[in-house]
Each structure stands twice: as C-alpha cells, then as structure tokens.
Amino acid sequence: MMEIVRIPVLNDNYVWLVHEPASGETMVVDPAVADPVLNAAKERGWTVTQIWNTHWHPDHTGGNEAIKAATGCTVTGPKAEAERIPTLDRLVGEGDVVTLGAVEAKVLDVPAHTAGHIAYHLPGEDVAFVGDTLFAMGCGRLFEGDAAQMYAAMRKFEAMPDETVIYCAHEYTEANGDFALAVEPQNEALVERMDEVRAKRARGEATVPTDIAAEKATNPFMRAGSVEELAKRRAAKDAA
C-alpha cells in the first residue's frame, strides 16, 4: 500500500508526498515550496524520485527546481503547459500512464482552471490527485477555460468508483460548503457533512482528502445538471 502524507504549506495549500514501499520510490504532487517537502521526506528516510505536476500555477510548481536540484528527481506534468513549467522532464496528457514503482496512474485531461490542467487517477489504489479542478464540495475557478470544460471534467470524476479518494490541493472546504448550502439548503447529506466540517475546522483539522461518493452527494458543481447550471453556480460562487 502506498503511504500518502499531507504537507500543509503557504496559506491553504496541501502538497502530497507519496511513498511506494515495494520500490522505495517517493513522489510529490504539486510542490508549492521545497523545504517542507524535503524535510518531510528526510524525516521518514525517503528520497524524492519524482514530481507530478497537475498545472502550471506557481503555488503548484514553485518547489520543482529546488527539489530537483536536491534529489535529481524527474518531473512529469501537462504537455499543454510545457512552456510554463520549464522544469518538466516528461510531458503527458490524456491516456498516458505514469508509474510510481509498480503503481500505475492514468492521466486525464481536465482543462478549465488552466488550459492544460491534468489529473492523475490511480485505479489500482482507488486514488486520484486532482490539483485545482475538483475540491471538497467545490471546483476550481475558470481562469483559462470554460464551464463546458469543467462540466466534462466533473463527468470524468463522477465515473470513478465511489470509493476513490480525492486528493485536492487546497483547504477550501468550509467556504465551499457554505456556498453549497446556499444552493441546496434541503440536502440532508450536505447539512450533515457541513456539521462535521465545521467541527474539524474548529479543532484545526484538515478536511481533505475527500471521496467520489461524498462529492456526488454534496458537491454543487458535480451535481449540476447541465453546463449552463454549472456556469451559473460558478459565477455565483465567484461573486460570493
């Protein structure tokens, strides 16, 4: 079984450190900064051998250069954003497979937040690393894409098994849930989930990862019935 470690950095980012014990390989997803990642790996006796980037934003790639210099790791990321991530060694897109030891991850194109955003789905582990496309009860802002692309991305995630654990990159859950309640105030699953989220945040605890079953039940963007409905909800959330 892989070991996955949450590393809180900056204001609300989460970097994911992933260790595959059979091979001894260690990978980091979207390192915003280097030192906390290198320290977390060192504490566990791990050496980072790979970085997987989901998109080009600096709070997801800012640690690439220093980690690569310190470890000699290889960096994999979206081929559609290669010009914006100069540290990339391998360029990938929809249908490509990347590996961590014997564990395989399928690459999904999920543009909308950025033009070339990708996600990594590890079906054998029931895990997906989704960057800033899918959040707990939310989705990423449409900085470089549109609602139709985000709607298509939601369908890709929705098709994953319910037990798939979703590792997103920010602690946005409470604010996302407040908006979701404004959209669906009678959603009992949502009301119950928000009670749990508020309690966790009051204790200073993280609320992610999440899973596909929870998002199907409570995420207003995954639950949007059309592109138009998703667009309307995204615009309302941006204005909130």
Image (cartoon, rainbow, N blue to C red):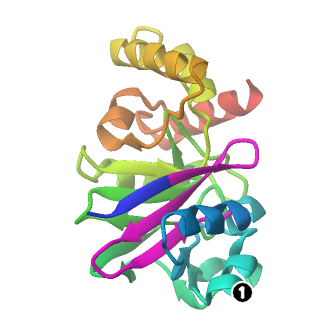
Q: Is residue 49 above or below residue 197?
A: below
Task: Tell me, yes or no, if residue 94 can be seen here.
Answer: no
Q: Nearer the viewer, residue 130 or 222?
A: 130
Task: Tell me, yes or no, if residue 77 can be seen here.
Answer: yes
Q: Is residue 140 above or below residue 64?
A: above
Crowd band around label 1 with a 10 angstrom C-alpha radius: few (<14), some (14–19), many (20+): few
* Residue at image point 32% right, 82% down: 23
Q: Is residue 114 above or below residue 98?
A: above
State the image coordinates of residue 167 (x, y, percent, origin top left): 46, 51
Relative to 155, is 198 on the left or the right? right
Residue range of the region highlighted in magenta in the rendering: 6-32
* Residue at image point 56% right, 14% down: 182
The residue sitting at the top extreme is: 186
Q: Quadrant of residue 216?
A: top left
Q: Nearer the viewer, residue 39 or 115?
A: 39
Q: Quadrant of the N terminus?
A: bottom left
Q: Quadrant of residue 143?
A: bottom right
Examine the structure image and report whether residue 11 is included in the region drawn in magenta.
Answer: yes
State the image coordinates of residue 34 (x, y, percent, origin top left): 71, 68
Relative to 83, is 102 on the left or the right? left
What residue does disc 1 label?
69
* Residue at image point 35% right, 42% down: 211
* Residue at image point 62% right, 90% down: 72
State the image coordinates of residue 223 (x, y, percent, origin top left): 40, 33
Examine the structure image and report whether residue 180 is included in the region drawn in magenta.
Answer: no
Q: For numbered disc 1, what is the local secondary structure? A: helix
Q: Quadrant of the C terminus?
A: top right
Say which amino acid is labelled 1.
Answer: Ala
